[in-house]
């Protein structure tokens, strides 16, 4: 990853990066298929974590699929992080869902209104937490510290230290996702496009992390 790489360059380079190692892309697509049966998930997540680490070191070519034990370890840890955030999101969603369910049982418009009013800020919080899950991932990759990764304050620090960069990150993720969606027009390509998409995300996430940490405004707790 280049020093002071601009946003446009980072998006373009994320696509180049996703195609930089055809052999790894081929294996990754096969593992993506296995992810449908859960088996491949830790390996895919572990590999993308390795991509982040290599990018942070400045290596702009996708790494090989070796040291499978390390991939599995990282994949399991990232899975744990996502499960934790998933549980938190579900519990927050219940805050709005319970009054809506009770309103139907009790035939109460008041409870329904309360649930609907709560739903708006709760959905905003849920979207924010979903976005933060990506930042949690890159924090883990950078620090190899599960405690620092699971701490939501670290993700918030990154966002607040570089809000413009964070908005650009969201735009970049949207662009990658949109173009990847078009590439899925042929069903047979979906696993490889899906894997490519995650690898491209790794590139732009590490771009944001590196840009933000270079400001000197963030100290991870």
Image: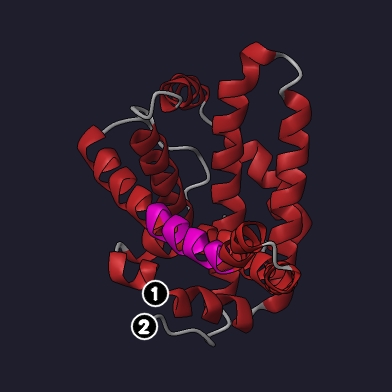
Q: Is residue 113 magenta?
A: no
> Which of labels 2 and 1 is toward the front?
1
Q: Main secondary structure of the magenta part?
A: helix
| Residue range of the region highlighted in magenta in the rendering | 82-95
Image quarter of residue 2: bottom right
- Most distant residue in the front direction: 106
Q: Is 97 rendered above or below residue 42?
A: below
Q: Is residue 90 left or right of residue 173?
A: left
Q: Are marks 2 and 1 in contact (CB under 8 Å)?
A: yes
Q: Is 92 rendered above or below residue 69?
A: below
Residue holding disc 1: 151
Is residue 184 at all visible to an observer of this figure?
Answer: yes
Cα separation, mark 2 vs mark 1, equals 8 Å
Query: How busy is the neighbourhood of tag 2: few (under 14 within 10 Å), some, or many (20 plus)?
Result: few
Give coordinates of residue 127: x percent, y percent: 64, 62
Give coordinates of residue 8: x percent, y percent: 78, 55
Q: Is residue 177 left or right of residue 43?
A: right
Say which element carries label 2.
loop
Residue at x-position 39% and y-position 34%: 41
Q: Is residue 130 left or right of residue 143?
A: right
Residue at x-position 74% and y-position 64%: 168
Q: What number is the disc on residue 221? A: 2
* Quadrant placement of the N terminus: bottom right
């Amino acid at each position: 990853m280049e020093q002071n790489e601009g946003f446009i360059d980072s998006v373009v380079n994320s696509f180049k990066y996703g195609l930089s190692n055809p052999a790894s892309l081929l294996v990754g697509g096969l593992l993506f298929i296995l992810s449908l049966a859960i088996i491949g998930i830790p390996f895919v997540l572990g590999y993308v974590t390795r991509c982040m680490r290599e990018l942070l070191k400045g290596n702009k070519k996708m790494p090989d699929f070796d040291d499978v034990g390390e991939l599995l370890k990282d994949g399991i840890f990232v899975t744990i992080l996502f499960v934790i955030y998933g549980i938190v999101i579900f519990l927050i969603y219940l805050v709005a869902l319970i009054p809506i369910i009770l309103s139907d049982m009790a035939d109460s418009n008041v409870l329904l209104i309360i649930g609907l009013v709560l739903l708006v800020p709760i959905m905003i919080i849920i979207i924010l937490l979903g976005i933060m899950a990506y930042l949690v991932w890159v924090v883990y990759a950078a620090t190899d510290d599960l405690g620092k990764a699971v701490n939501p304050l670290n993700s918030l620090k990154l966002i607040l230290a570089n809000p413009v960069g964070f908005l650009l990150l969201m735009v970049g993720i949207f662009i990658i996702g949109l173009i990847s969606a078009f590439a899925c027009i042929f069903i047979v390509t979906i696993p490889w496009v899906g894997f490519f998409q995650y690898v491209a995300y790794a590139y732009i996430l590490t771009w944001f992390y590196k840009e933000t940490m270079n400001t000197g405004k963030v100290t991870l707790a």
